[in-house]
Amino acid sequence: MRKKIIFTMMALTMAIAMVAGGTMAWFTDEADAGETTFTAGTVILEADEAVLGETVTWDNWNPGDEGTVEWGFINEGTKAINLRAKLDKGWIGIQSLEDLETFNSVLRAMARIGVEGSGDWELGIIQEGSHSPAQGTQNHFTWPKATAVPFKLTFDGEVVTYIVGSGDDAITMTYAVDEEDFNDIVITTRSTSEAYSVLVNNLMLDGIELGAENFIEENGWSYLIIRRENLGEGFVLTGESTMDWEGNRPSRSHLTYQIELGNSTEPLLSPENVDWNVIGNDNWILNLEGFETGYYYYVVEENEENVLGRIAGTYGDEADEDERTRTLSFNVYLKGEETGNEYQGAKYIFSLNAEAVQASNGAAEAMWGLEVSDEE
C-alpha cells in the first residue's frame, strides 16, 4: 500500500491564443467574406499527490534508509505541452540553538505588544541592521487577549508582503527586497514573564504543514528554523498567533514574535545529507542545456540530442489518458555517514512545482529563458 504524505495538487491554466472567444470579420474588394470565430486552446496541467514507495517508514527515518517518491502529471488541456518541474526540499526543526549561531538575517516581519495610546508601533518589517520598521511598514494593532490572529507572509521574488488580521481589520505591509539572499526562515517568539504567553501555530509553508512540535524553547524564547532550497525565489507562509496575559496588559515587546528571512553559512542541518536521483525514466533531464537551470525538463532524443518533449492534448481525441500522462520518480537516500544525532526528530519536507507551456510557436523558448547564441 502506498502512503500519501504531501499535497501537490496544482491546476495551472493558461489561455493560449491570439483571440479568445471573440469574432473577426474581413472584407475583400469583391464581397463580404462573412464572419469567422477563433476559440482559444487551453493548457491545463494536473498533478497527483506525491506517493511513496514501501521501502522506508517515512515518518521514522534512520541513517542509511532509502525509498522512492513519485509524482504524476496529466495534460487535461486541448493543446500539446512542454513540461518542466522544480524540487523544493529541506529540513524543518532544530535540535540545538547552535543552528542559529551562523544565521545571517536579511529582514524580519515583527509583531509585538506596544504601548497603547502612545503612538508606539506593533507591526512592521525591519531591515537588517535596523531596530525600527522600514518606512511605510510601521503600523498600529490592538492585540485581542487570548484570541488567535491570522497572519500571512509571502515573497514573490521581489516583494515581501506581510498581512496580519482578517477582513476589514487586516493590515498589509510590503517591502521590496534588493537581493534574494535567503534560504532560511527563523520564527521566534518571546515572553518575558510567566504571566505572559505567545503562541504561533497552524503554520503552513506552500501548503505543507509545519508542526509546532519542532519549536525549541529556552528562557521564555522559542525558535523554529525552516531551511528550503528555493525560498529566495518565492514562498507563502501562513499561521496564527495568540497573545495572552494575566493581570495588566503588557507593553514594550514583553510579548512578541518575529519571522526572519536570512541564511546560515554553516547550517547544522545540511540538506546535503539527502540524495535525490531520477529513476525509471530517461526522459527527465536536470538543467537542459540552453534553458533556465534548476529544473527537470521532459525531453525526447532527436539526432542524438535531448530536446523538449511534446505531450499531446485532448483536441480532436488524438491522445488517450495514458498518452497524456507522465511521471517523475526519484530515489531518496539518507546518507548514514553524514547524518548524526543532531537530525533526530527533525522533519525533511519535499515538494514539486510543475509548469506547462504550449508546445508550439516557440513558447517554451520565450517563457523558460532559452539562451540564443550570437554565432551564425
Image (cartoon, helix red, strand yellow):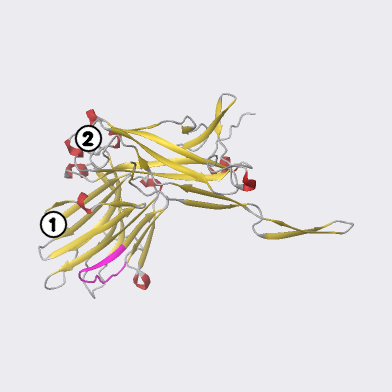
Verify whether residue 348 appears in magenta: no
- Name which residue lies at 34% across and 41% down: 2
Residue at numbered disc 2? 62
Amino acid beneath label 1: Gly
Q: Nearer the viewer, mark 1 or mark 2?
A: 2
* Main secondary structure of the magenta stretch: loop
**Label 1, on which residue?**
220
Find residue 223 and report its horizontal and vertical position in percent. Answer: 20, 51
How far apart are the two marked residues, 1 and 2, measured between alpha carbons?
32 Å
Side (left or right) of 174 relative to 243: right
For the N terminus, the quadrant is top left
Name which residue lies at 27% across and 40% down.
58
Q: Nearer the viewer, residue 44 or 188?
A: 44
The picture places residue 200, in percent across and down from the top left corner, at 23, 59
In this view, the residue farthest toward the bottom is 117
Q: Is residue 161 above or below residue 276?
A: below
